Amino acid sequence: MSSPIVYRPMEPADAEAVSRLIAESFTEFIGPEYTDEGRAEFLRHVEPAALVERTRSNHFVLVAMAGEQPAGVIDLRDNDHVSLLFVDSRHQRHGIARELLARALTVVRPAKPGLDRVTVNSSRFGVPAYERLGFRQTGPERTVNGIVFIPMAHQLDAD
């Protein structure tokens, strides 16, 4: 990693590159376990316009930038659910996901007093990474619209 990582809210101008990072990571690591319907559903969910639209409603999107390119992204829905967490394969295992989660929670916690847990619907591939971040499985694997996921939660320390 040559460029220092800068963490900041996603701007509309970032959406194209962020969408590409997510789609490439998804296709490489997660897509093979989904049905055609699931792959199409997921890729629609991360189109640039969809990312921008969600930031205007109930989603907070934080990016980790390595120079001009995103190295990672987290999308928190309703301040308590990890909707997306992806790190470019060249930047994995350098603490970017952990830092994205920590920084995003620092931003959203004041808006949700009493927040004591964060949830995620993890892919099979993502389970070990989420476990390293402190998440634990809370229910059986499910498939909805061709998307396979494992519900998980992370208990937060009191402020």
Image: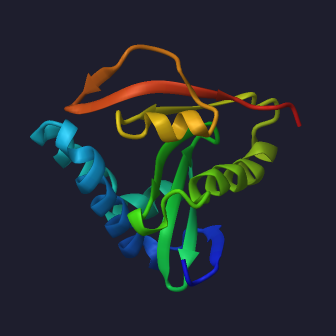
Where residue 14 appears, as percent x and y from the top left, is 46, 75
| Residue visible at 57% across and 47% down in the picture | 76
Query: Does 44 sit left or right of 97 as displayed?
Result: left
149 is higher (above) or lower (below) than 99: above
Image quadrant where residue 6 sits: bottom right
4 is higher (above) or lower (below) than 88: below
Where residue 144 appears, as percent x and y from the top left, is 26, 26
Q: Quadrant of the N terminus?
A: bottom right
Image quadrant where residue 99 sits: bottom right
Which of the pair 71/51 is nearer the observer? 71
136 is higher (above) or lower (below) than 75: above
Q: Do we see residue 57 in this rendering? A: no
Where residue 91 appears, as percent x and y from the top left, is 49, 66
Which of the pair 158/29 is nearer the observer? 29
| Residue visible at 53% across and 41% down in the picture | 82
| Residue visible at 89% across and 37% down in the picture | 159
Image quadrant where residue 10 sits: bottom right
Where residue 131 appears, as percent x and y from the top left, is 55, 33
**Farthest residue in the right direction?**
159
Q: How many discs mark residues in the rendered view?
A: 0
Q: Do we see residue 38 in this rendering? A: yes
